[in-house]
Image (tube, rainbow, N blue to C red):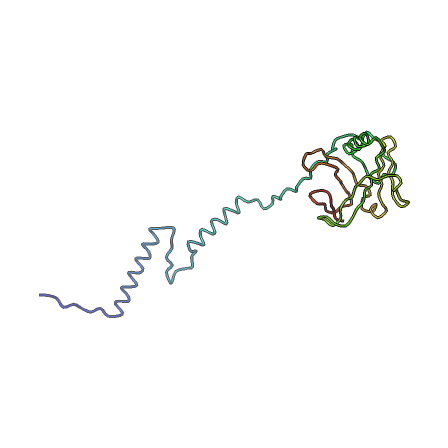
């Protein structure tokens, strides 16, 4: 004889469902540590993504030294660095000629078989605002307002016009013999910034 099927009341059905949910939640938490099922009445916990993010942040913090400063870039050595000056500079010279630059000027004087008059100045333009100007000149073109550095033993004369003297006073003229980027180089103590090519500067 078949027994009559008893209907479960709504309150009993809810209680049974809650019990099943509780067992499923407890079983899931104990079987895995990576995922967490959050019970509606449980205390707030971190999700999987939050746990991974927290672990990565702590690992990065352990391997990064925040007190370590970035090393400052070092400037390239000057062509005549370490060489002794073998010529006599005039008193209160405007332009200081480095040893390699003087060697090159001697070569040019020998080739031309005459005195070298080197006119130096500044004009507007260039990457940094002002550009160096250097060209050969003659004694006849030297003006009354020009500043003149005489090197009688070398047969070399440096001439700077009055307007440029403010920017060029104390400049060192050097010479590099590199195949790329060689030639006369300017090292100006008055420049606050210089172009990478070395032919222009800013004050």
Q: In this view, does 62 lie to the left or right of 116?
A: left
Q: List the single residue furthest toward the right.
A: 144
Q: List the single residue furthest toward the left.
A: 1
Q: What percent of the width, then of the height, locates residue 132?
A: 77, 44
Q: List the single residue furthest toward the front.
A: 112
Q: Is residue 193 left or right of residue 165?
A: left
Q: Is residue 193 left or right of residue 10?
A: right
Tally of marks: 0
Q: What percent of the width, then of the height, locates residue 196?
A: 69, 43
Q: What percent of the width, then of the height, locates residue 116?
A: 83, 35
Q: Residue 184 is drawn in which quadrant? A: top right
| Residue in view at x 73 percent, y 43 percent | 199
Quadrant in the picture for the N terminus? bottom left
| Residue in view at x 33 percent, y 56 percent | 26
Who is closer to the viewer here, 82 or 63?
A: 82
| Residue in view at x 87 percent, y 40 percent | 148
| Residue in view at x 78 percent, y 38 percent | 173
Q: Is residue 77 above or below residue 121?
A: above
Q: In this view, does 46 lie to the left or right of 17?
A: right
Q: Is residue 163 above or below residue 139?
A: below
Who is closer to the viewer here, 23 or 92?
A: 92
Q: Residue 46 is drawn in which quadrant? A: bottom left
Q: What percent of the width, then of the height, locates residue 98?
A: 78, 34
Q: Residue 142 is drawn in which quadrant? A: top right
Who is closer to the viewer here, 162 or 79?
A: 162
């Amino acid at each position: 004889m078949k027994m009559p099927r008893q209907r479960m009341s709504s309150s009993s059905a809810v209680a049974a469902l809650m019990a099943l949910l509780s067992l499923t939640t407890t079983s899931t938490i104990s079987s895995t540590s990576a995922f967490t099922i959050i019970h509606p009445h449980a205390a707030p916990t971190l999700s999987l993504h939050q746990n991974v993010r927290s672990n990565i942040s702590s690992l990065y913090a352990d391997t990064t030294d925040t007190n370590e400063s970035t090393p400052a870039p070092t400037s390239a050595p000057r062509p005549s660095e370490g060489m002794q000056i073998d010529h006599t500079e005039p008193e209160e010279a405007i332009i200081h000629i480095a040893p390699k630059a003087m060697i090159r000027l001697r070569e040019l004087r020998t080739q031309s078989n005459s005195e070298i008059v080197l006119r130096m100045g500044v004009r507007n333009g260039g990457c940094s605002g002002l550009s160096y100007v250097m060209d050969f000149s003659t004694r006849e073109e030297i003006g009354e307002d020009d500043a003149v550095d005489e090197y009688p033993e070398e047969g070399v004369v440096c001439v700077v016009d009055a307007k440029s003297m403010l920017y060029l006073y104390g400049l060192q003229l050097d010479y590099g013999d590199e195949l790329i980027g060689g030639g006369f180089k300017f090292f100006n103590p008055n420049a606050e910034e210089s172009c990478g090519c070395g032919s222009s500067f800013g004050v």
